[in-house]
Image (cartoon, rainbow, N blue to C red):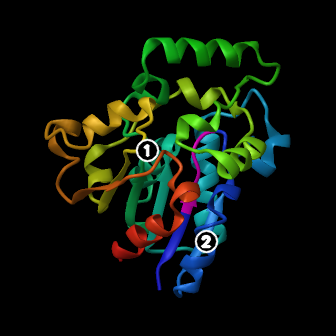
Amino acid sequence: MANFLLVHGAWHGAWCWQRVLPDLMGAGHRAHAVTLTGVGERAHLLHPSIGLESHITDVMAAMDAEEMEEVVLVVHSYAGMLGTAVADRRPERLRHLVYLDAVLPKPGESWSSTHASATRNTRIAAAQAHPLHAFPAPDPSVFGLSDADHAWVQRRQTPHPGGPYTQVLDFDPQRVASVPRTFINCSSPPLGTIDVSRLRMVDPKFWDGAWLPGSQVREMRTGHDPMVSDPDGLIQHLLSLL
């Protein structure tokens, strides 16, 4: 039995894993999805004080509350920042770290550091203009979603706290590299804001060479939200890592 802890990306919540959780549990594993502070069903907690540490704490608190050891930590998109932090601080608690089309930061970088200046400036300005310091969700078509899937995600998305966007993450890459890691690249269509991370995942110099040992790269020919667009394919990848 494995312990899966699933962490959504920006604008989402635990709701986005609804098509994945039942089959993981049906296969005999424990599976729990986290909702980060200020989004999803916790959108009522949105506040200007929410920062990167708030969300890192959300993930570690879920591990503690669920009494999870040997965790398969699946981090989607923005949550790559959080998974990296948890692997740095609690590597002994992790069995595998799965970057699901996720941000791969360098030490001392922010999430916004991995984006083009136009994207970065637009999001920062939007957060500054929001009364609770948050920026709105994009149209789900950028995630490769259409029809009923598009409508479902569009209804459920909420503004994302602005603080975590620009706050830097310091970590020891050697500690993170001590955890087995997999990057799942969602390539059809690829999301442009993940492009920097896609290049890093195959760069032998990334983290001064610490990334590649013990890591692997998988590909899914679906969009940025595979838990919505191809849950069966995602489940197969996750179970194959055990």
Q: Check the picture and name the quadrant holding the C terminus.
A: bottom left
Q: Which mark is residue 102?
A: 1
Between 82 and 100, the residue placed more toward the observer is 100
Q: SS at mark 2? A: helix
From the viewer's side, name the closer residue of 188 and 63.
188
Identify the residue under disc 2: 21
Q: Left or right of 181: which side holds 69? A: right
For this orientation, the residue located farthest to the right is 44
Does 237 sit left or right of 48 as displayed? Answer: left
- Name the residue: 67% across, 32% down: 137
Image coordinates of residue 204 in percent, x first then y, are 13, 41
Does residue 207 lie above or below 70 as drawn?
A: above
Apparent side of residue 96 relative to residue 24 in the rendered image (left or right) = left
Label whose residue precedes the other's in the sequence (1 or 2): 2
Residue 43 x %, y %? 80, 42
Q: Quadrant of residue 220?
A: bottom left
Tell me the SS state at disc 1: loop
Residue 20 magenta-drawn?
A: no
Residue at the spot 65% in from the left edge and 32% down from the top edge: 139
The magenta stretch spans which residues?
Answer: 6-10
The numbered mark at residue 143 is none
